[in-house]
Amino acid sequence: GAVVSQHPSWVICKSGTSVKIECRSLDFQATTMFWYRQFPKQSLMLMATSNEGSKATYEQGVEKDKFLINHASLTLSTLTVTSAHPEDSSFYICSARTRGRTETQYFGPGTRLLVL
Amino acid sequence: GENVEQHPSTLSVQEGDSAVIKCTYSDSASNYFPWYKQELGKRPQLIIDIRSNVGEKKDQRIAVTLNKTAKHFSLHITETQPEDSAVYFCAAREMSGGSNYKLTFGKGTLLTVNP
């Protein structure tokens, strides 16, 4: 089946530093990838949608200068949390949609970010 | 945009009983409705989905029903087992936004199956 990986699985950083999270589709080409944020015991909140080779589309209220998204290839998208602060601590999950199908989304294992 | 309401927020059943989770959506143009299961600290896993041209779909102990007129869909789990314990999310696919077709998720239901 379609496999999505994420790296790192968890990261602890100091306030003010930047953190990059990678999302890869391992056995399929993903023209579209989604980035979600999930707080404890809450739902998945879509942050942005990235299409290969074009700028990401951000949801309302999500700062594009703080959460930089790059979808450079059909198998890789990155999310960079710039100048991270404690309130950015969360569980970040990416999702990829298989090429040629507009429905099924497969999720990565998530990255737990803790900003001290 | 799309708004998805999910009920109940928590559900506790005895092993072997059935569990039903219900969702409503607001955008009548939405046409794809997946259900995801998420165990603690893990990724959401697609367990079943349904498209708007179908009223019901079943996969072993799991079934989903869709009522387009009322704009609601439900997840049914029969013969529940302790390993069914998890958070379940429903979602609806928005048709707006061009080809992005983003999913809007419900708030989730914590299902606990007691042995």
Image (tube, coloured by chain):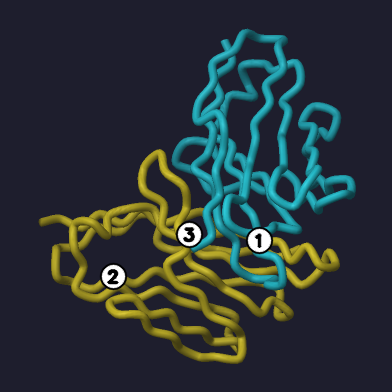
Chain colours: A cyan, B yellow
Chain at tag 3: B
Residue A97: mark: 1
- Answer with left or right where residue A116 lies relative to residue A17: left
Q: Is residue A103 above or below residue A21?
A: below
| Amino acid tagged 3 | Phe
Helix, strand or loop status at disc 3:
strand
Residue picked out by circle 2: B19
Which quadrant of the structure image shows residue A60?
A: top right
Chain identifier of the residue bearing label 1 in the image: A
Three-letter code for the amino acid on which mark 1 is drawn: Arg
Q: Quick check: A78 above or below A87?
A: below
Q: Position of residue A44 (x, y in %)?
A: 57, 48
Which numbered tag is attached to residue B89?
Answer: 3
Q: Position of residue A108 (x, y in %)?
A: 54, 46
Using the image, determine if residue B103 lies above or below residue B55.
Answer: above
Viewer-nearest of discs 1 and 2: 1
Residue type, numbered disc 2:
Ala
Task: From the top left corner, tell me how far across and down residue B42 is, in percent.
Answer: 42, 43
Depth check: A47 or A29 in front? A29
Q: Secondary structure at mark 1?
A: strand
Q: Nearer the viewer, mark 3 or mark 1?
A: 1
Corner quadrant of residue B2: bottom right
